[in-house]
Amino acid sequence: MPLVYVSIGSNLGDRASYLQFAKRELLAIAGLTDLQCSPIYETEPVAAEGGPFLNAVWSFKTDLSSQDLLKKTQKIEAQANRQRNKPNEARTLDLDILFYGDQVIREPGMIIPHPRLHERAFVLEPMVKLDPDFVHPVLKKTVKELLCNVQRGA
């Protein structure tokens, strides 16, 4: 079973409740085990509307395919009243698959590793708390190295 990393964020409504909702829903999915959660960070929006985000990264093992996992995470977002009316709008819940094991996936509607995660401290900082030595399968750098690059502005 691949080890999957997912970023979670909310900047609309009762943000903490939406994160708890997502956790309950993920734990209810058959074939998903060993959920680990980073600390939760409050961050200012980057290229998004609305107020501050609560952000975290979670890891788990799953026997779901990447496509099935994407469908499940999108269903959880929809159950949390996630609206997708325009890019970068405020959101009740945002679940992004960052890594699916060490696989590189380029399919319609799915790019893994997430194409901008190496530019986002709000993703890398919580990810480093879970697994600082995880190596990005495309960039061939650890997430700790990627975070250092972002912090230095490299």
Image: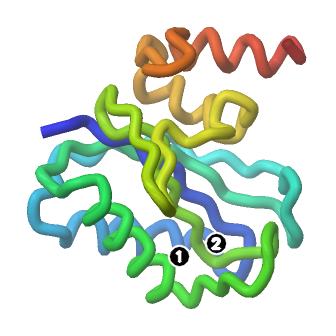
Query: What residue do we see at 25% from left, 36% from top?
Result: 3
The residue nearer to you, when weighing 24 against 85, is 85
Mark 2 crowd level (few <14, some 14–19, many ≥20, 10 Å Cα): some
Residue type of the residue flagged with mark 2 = Arg
**Quarter containing the C terminus:** top right
Q: Are marks 1 and 2 in contact (CB under 8 Å)?
A: yes
Q: Quadrant of residue 149?
A: top right
The residue shown at (73%, 33%) is 121
- For label 1, the crowd category at 10 Å Cα-Cα, with few meaning under 14, some 14 to 19 and many 20 or more, is some
Say what secondary structure mark 2 lies in: helix
Q: Which quadrant of the rendered structure holds the N terminus?
A: top left
Query: What colour scheme governs how the chains and residues are painted in the rendered image of this protein?
Result: rainbow
According to the image, label 1 marks what residue? 17
The answer to whether residue 12 is above or below residue 54 is below
Residue 47 location (% of width, % of height): 88, 55
Residue 46: x %, y % from top left: 85, 51
Placement of 50 over or under 32, stated as above or below? below
| Nearer the observer, 27 or 70 | 70
Q: Is 103 displayed left or right of 153 in the figure?
A: left
Q: Secondary structure at mark 1?
A: helix
Residue 90 figure quarter: bottom right
The answer for how far apart the CA atoms under marks 1 and 2 are is 5 Å
Label of residue 15 in the image:
2
Residue 104, given in percent of the width and then of the height, sits at 40, 33
What's the residue at 42%, 29% (across, down)?
Answer: 130
Amino acid type at circle 1 is Ser
Q: How many marks?
A: 2
| Nearest to the observer: residue 119 or residue 28 | 119
- Residue at x 44%, y 69% (from the top left corner): 20
Q: Please say if 114 is above or below 14.
A: above
